[in-house]
C-alpha cells in the first residue's frame, strides 16, 4: 500500500547543517485528499527518515520510517520532494526553495552514507573476532600492507594526472609552432614527457597487480575462515535446539511426576536422599552454583545460588540444586522464622461438604448474525449481550475468588519477620491470577445493589462480602475479615479498551491488607489483563505490568514484574519476577515463578555489582540460598474443561445456601438458568433484569430532577442524596488519599437476625 506524505522544514535552530549525522525540521506531508498536506516533524538519522506529528511524540510514537539506502529521491517543483522505497511514497513539501535544497542535500548525503554502511556490513557480515593474539597481529599486518599498497596507487594516480596535464600542454604548444628549429626542441620535450608518463603508468600497473594478488590470497583465507565459522554456528544452533527440546520434555515429565515431600520438617532424610546427595557431591559440576540471568527488560539483577553449607542444606532438607529438582515448601525452610511454619488452615477439614461439580456446559453454537440483527436501530446501552459470552458467575463472585489461597495470609499473619510476611503477601497477590489462564468467558455484570457473601467462618475462619456500589462507572466494594489475624478490603473499578485484535482490562483501585497483631498495612494494585484474538482465533488471556506492594508501617517494598507473553522470547511464559527490599532499598529476597503455576523465594546472602547488560545498564549480582516454594496452584477438578474451567472454589461459589441476603448473586435468576444449561431462558431473563434496572435508574433520575427543581423554593426545597449502597459508605483513605467505599458494618448482624427488610428488590 502506498503511503504518501509531505513536510516543511522550518528547521531553523532545530536542524544542524546538512551533512551532519542528524537533521531535523518541519515539513508538510501529503496525507489524503480530505486533509491534504499536514505539518509533521521529520528526523533524519542513521540513514533513516522518520516523522512524527509533534516533537513531543519522538519519545514514544513514530508515525513512519523510510530507509534511504533503498530509496529514490526526486524533486517535482521548487518546493516538493518525493521519496519512494518498497512501494511506499512520501510526498513532502518544504516552505521555501532554499529549505527544499537543504533537505535534498541532507537526504542525498545520508543515502550515500547508508549505502556505504550497508556494503560494509555485507562485507563484514560473517567475520568473527579473532580468538588469539597471533591472528589479530596477522590481520593487522595484512591491513597495513594493503593500506601501503593503496597509498602507492594513490601516489601513482596523482603523478599520472600531473604528467598527463604537462603532456597535453606540450602537444598544444607543438601544434602552434611555425619554425622548424623550435619544432625539434618541442618534439624532444614531448618525447621526454611521454617517457615519464609510460614509466609512471608501468609503476601503477605493477602496484595494482601486487595489490590484486595480495587481496586474492587473503580473500581465499578469509573465505575458508568464514565458511568454518558458519558451519560452527549452524552446529551450535542445532545443539541448542536439541537441548531446548530435551529441556521441555524433562520439564513436562517433572510436572506430571508425583511430588514426594516429607510430611513434617523433622522427618529424617531417606536413604535415597542420602544416596542422591552423595552422587551430587561426586559430580564434577555443582548444581548450586548455576547462574540465572534476568530478562533484558526486567529489574537489572542476576541471582547466583550460594554454594556455602551446600552439604548441610542438602542433608537437612533433601533439596536438589537451584537448577534441578523441586523446591522445598516453607515449612521445610531452614532460613524462615519458626512462626511461619505452623500448621496452616488448609489442613483443617471443612465441616460442610460442598459440591464438586456443576452441569456440563452446553455445546451451543454462537450465531453472530442472530445477535447483530437484534441490535439494529437500538441504543448501544440497550443491546442485550447473550449469555453465550458469559460464565455462570458474577463479577462479585470472581472478586471473591481472590481468596482461594487465603492460607497464604494465615501463614503471613503468624510471621515475626515483616520481610518474610511480605514474600507471602506477594505470593498471594500473584495467586489471584492463577484461575484466569483458561477462563476466557466473561462474568455477569452485577446489578446495582447486588451483593455476594462468602461465609467460611467455620471452615477457614473468614467472612467475605462484596457489593456493587456503582453502575456508571461499574464499581464493586469488597471486605474480608479473618479470625486468623488479618483484614482485607478493596474497591475495584474496571476500565477497558478495545484495540482491534485484543481487549485490555485495567482494574482501578487499591487493595488494602492489614495484619492485626503487627499492625503491618500493605497496599498494592492489580496489573492489566489482556484478552487476545477477540475477532479471529482462539481466545487467550495474558497478564502484564508491574505491581508495587508497600508496607506503610515499615516502608518495606516488593516490586513484582509480570512479563508479557512473546512468541520470540526465550523465557518461561507467564513469568513473574520480584525483589523484596527494606525501607533503605536493600534487597533481601528474590521472587520468581509464573502467575499460573507457582511462586518461589530465595533469600539473598550477598550482593555485588556485575557487568553491563545488553542495554549498557550495570546489573546487580545477588548470591542467594536455594529457592523455597511460597505458593503452588491447586490442580483443576476432574472434567473442568466441561465446567468452564472452574477451580474447586469456583464450583462452590454459586451453590445455593440458606439465610443469605435477598440481593445475593446466588439468587440471580438468569445466572442460575445458565448454570442449569437453559441458555435461551437465561437470555430472556437477563434482558428482563437489565430493563428493570434501567427503569429504576430512570425513576431515580426523575427524582433527582424534581429535587433540583424544588431547590429554587427555600421553604420546600430538599436535597436529593442519590443512590447509597446498603453495606458500604465512602471514606477518604488516610494512606492513599483516595475516596473509596469501605464496609460500614451491619450485614452479618442482619444475617444472624435473618432481617433483610432493608434489601431492595433487584431481581
Image: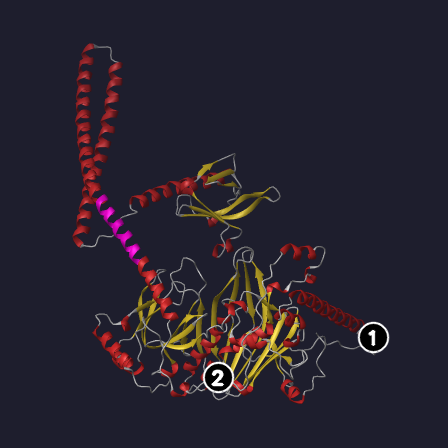
Q: Which region shows up in magenta?
A: 223-240
Question: Residue 330: x percent and y percent?
Answer: 39, 81
- x 52%, y 35%: residue: 78
Q: Nearer the viewer, residue 478 or 154?
A: 478
Q: Residues within 10 Å of mark 1 (few under 14, many from 20)?
A: few
Q: Check if residue 523 falls in the magenta segment.
A: no
- Please, what is the dominant secondary structure of the magenta stretch? helix
Q: Are marks 1 and 2 in contact (CB under 8 Å)?
A: no
Q: Which residue is mark 2?
A: 520
Using the image, tell me which numbered label, if any, was put on residue 554. none
290, above or below 226, in the image: below
The colour scheme used here is secondary structure
State which quadrant residue 325 falls in. Answer: bottom left
Q: Give the number of marks.
A: 2
- Report the front residue among 88 and 336: 336
Q: Which mark is residue 713?
A: 1
Residue 49 location (% of width, % of height)? 45, 46
Residue 85 seen = yes
Q: Describe the element under mark 2 as helix, strand or loop.
A: loop
Counting from the top left corner in percent of width and height, residue 528 is at 52, 66
Asked whether, in this view, residue 655 is left or right of residue 426, the answer is: right
- Residue 246 vs residue 749, the one in the foreground: 246
User: What SS does tag 1 mark?
Assistant: loop
Density class for disc 2 (Cα within 10 Å; few <14, some 14-19, many ≥20) is many
Q: Is residue 10 visible?
A: no
Q: Is residue 180 left or right of residue 17?
A: left
Q: CA distance from mark 1 to mark 2?
A: 52 Å
Q: Against 277, is 183 above or below?
A: above
Dot 1 or dot 2: first in sequence order is 2
Amino acid at each position: 500500500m502506498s503511503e504518501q506524505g509531505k513536510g516543511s522544514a522550518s528547521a531553523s535552530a532545530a536542524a544542524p547543517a546538512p551533512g551532519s549525522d542528524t537533521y531535523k525540521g518541519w515539513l508538510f506531508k501529503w496525507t489524503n485528499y480530505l486533509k491534504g498536506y499536514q505539518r509533521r516533524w521529520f528526523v533524519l538519522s542513521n540513514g533513516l527518515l522518520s516523522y512524527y506529528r509533534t516533537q513531543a511524540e519522538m519519545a514514544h510514537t513514530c508515525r513512519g520510517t523510510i530507509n534511504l539506502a533503498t530509496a529514490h529521491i526526486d524533486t517535482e517543483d521548487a518546493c516538493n520532494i518525493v521519496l519512494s522505497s518498497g512501494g511506499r511514497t512520501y510526498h513532502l513539501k518544504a516552505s521555501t526553495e532554499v529549505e527544499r535544497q537543504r533537505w535534498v542535500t541532507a537526504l542525498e548525503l545520508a543515502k550515500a552514507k547508508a549505502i556505504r554502511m550497508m556494503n560494509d556490513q555485507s562485507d563484514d557480515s560473517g567475520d568473527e573476532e579473532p580468538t588469539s593474539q597471533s591472528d589479530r597481529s596477522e590481520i593487522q599486518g595484512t591491513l597495513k600492507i594493503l593500506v601501503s599498497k593503496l597509498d602507492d596507487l594513490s601516489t601513482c594516480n596523482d603523478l599520472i594526472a600531473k604528467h598527463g596535464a604537462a603532456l597535453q600542454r606540450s602537444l598544444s604548444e607543438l601544434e602552434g609552432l611555425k619554425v622548424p628549429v623550435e619544432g625539434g626542441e618541442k618534439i624532444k620535450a614531448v618525447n621526454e614527457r611521454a617517457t615519464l608518463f609510460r614509466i609512471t603508468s608501468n609503476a601503477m600497473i605493477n602496484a595494482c597487480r601486487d595489490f590484486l594478488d595480495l587481496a586474492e590470497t587473503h580473500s581465499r583465507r578469509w573465505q575458508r575462515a568464514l565458511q568454518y565459522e558458519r558451519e560452527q554456528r549452524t552446529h551450535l544452533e542445532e545443539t541448542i535446539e536439541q537441548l531446548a527440546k530435551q529441556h521441555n520434555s524433562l520439564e513436562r515429565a517433572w510436572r506430571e511426576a508425583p511430588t514426594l515431600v516429607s510430611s513434617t520438617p523433622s522427618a529424617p532424610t531417606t536413604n535415597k536422599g542420602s544416596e542422591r546427595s552423595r552422587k551430587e557431591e561426586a559430580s564434577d559440576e555443582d548444581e548450586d552454583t548455576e547462574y540465572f540471568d534476568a530478562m533484558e527488560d526486567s529489574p537489572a539483577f542476576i541471582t547466583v545460588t550460594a554454594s556455602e553449607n551446600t552439604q548441610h542444606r542438602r542433608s537437612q532438607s533433601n533439596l536438589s540444586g537451584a537448577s534441578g529438582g523441586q523446591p522445598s515448601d516453607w515449612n521445610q525452610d531452614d532460613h524462615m522464622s519458626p512462626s511461619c511454619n505452623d500448621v496452616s488452615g488448609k489442613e483443617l477439614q471443612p465441616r460442610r461438604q460442598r459440591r464438586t461439580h456443576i452441569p456440563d456446559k452446553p455445546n451451543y453454537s454462537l450465531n453472530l448474525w442472530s445477535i447483530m440483527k437484534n441490535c439494529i436501530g437500538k441504543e448501544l446501552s440497550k443491546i442485550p449481550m447473550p449469555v453465550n459470552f458469559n460464565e455462570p458467575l458474577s463479577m462479585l463472585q470472581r472478586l471473591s475468588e481472590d481468596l482461594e489461597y487465603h492460607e497464604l495470609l494465615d501463614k503471613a499473619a503468624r510471621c515475626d519477620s515483616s520481610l518474610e510476611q511480605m514474600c507471602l503477601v506477594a505470593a498471594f497477590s500473584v495467586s489471584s491470577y492463577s484461575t484466569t489462564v483458561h477462563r476466557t468467558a466473561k462474568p455477569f455484570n452485577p446489578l446495582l445493589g447486588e451483593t455476594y457473601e462468602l461465609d467460611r467462618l467455620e471452615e477457614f475462619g473468614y467472612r467475605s462480602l462484596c457489593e456493587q456500589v456503582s453502575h456508571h462507572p461499574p464499581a464493586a466494594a469488597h471486605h474480608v475479615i479473618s479470625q486468623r489475624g488479618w483484614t482485607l478490603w478493596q474497591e475495584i473499578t474496571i476500565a477497558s479498551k478495545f484495540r482491534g485484535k485484543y481487549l485490555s482490562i485495567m482494574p482501578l483501585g487499591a487493595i488494602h491488607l492489614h495484619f492485626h497483631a503487627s499492625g503491618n498495612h500493605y497496599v498494592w494494585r492489580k496489573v492489566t489483563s489482556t484478552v487476545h484474538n477477540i475477532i479471529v482465533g482462539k481466545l487467550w488471556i495474558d497478564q502484564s505490568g508491574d505491581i508495587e506492594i508497600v508496607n506503610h508501617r515499615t516502608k518495606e517494598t516488593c516490586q513484582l514484574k509480570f512479563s508479557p507473553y512473546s512468541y520470540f522470547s526465550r523465557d518461561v511464559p507467564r513469568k513473574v519476577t520480584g525483589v523484596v527490599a527494606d525501607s533503605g532499598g536493600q534487597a533481601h529476597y528474590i521472587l520468581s515463578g509464573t502467575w499460573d503455576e507457582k511462586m518461589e523465594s530465595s533469600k539473598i546472602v550477598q550482593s555485588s555489582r556485575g557487568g553491563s547488560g545488553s542495554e549498557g545498564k550495570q546489573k546487580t549480582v545477588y548470591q542467594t540460598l536455594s529457592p523455597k516454594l511460597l505458593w503452588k496452584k491447586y490442580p483443576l477438578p476432574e472434567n473442568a474443561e466441561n465446567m468452564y474451567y472452574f477451580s474447586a472454589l469456583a464450583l462452590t461459589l454459586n451453590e445455593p445456601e440458606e439465610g443469605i441476603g435477598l440481593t445475593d448473586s446466588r439468587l440471580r435468576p438468569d445466572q442460575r438458568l445458565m448454570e442449569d444449561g437453559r441458555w435461551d431462558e437465561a437470555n430472556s431473563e437477563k434482558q428482563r433484569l437489565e430493563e428493570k434496572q434501567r427503569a429504576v435508574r430512570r425513576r431515580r433520575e426523575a427524582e433527582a430532577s424534581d429535587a433540583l427543581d424544588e431547590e429554587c423554593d427555600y421553604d420546600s426545597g430538599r436535597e436529593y442524596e442519590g443512590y447509597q449502597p446498603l453495606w458500604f459508605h465512602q471514606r477518604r483513605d488516610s494512606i492513599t488519599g483516595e475516596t473509596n467505599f469501605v464496609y460500614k458494618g451491619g450485614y452479618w448482624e442482619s444475617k444472624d437476625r435473618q432481617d433483610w427488610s432493608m434489601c431492595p428488590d433487584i431481581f
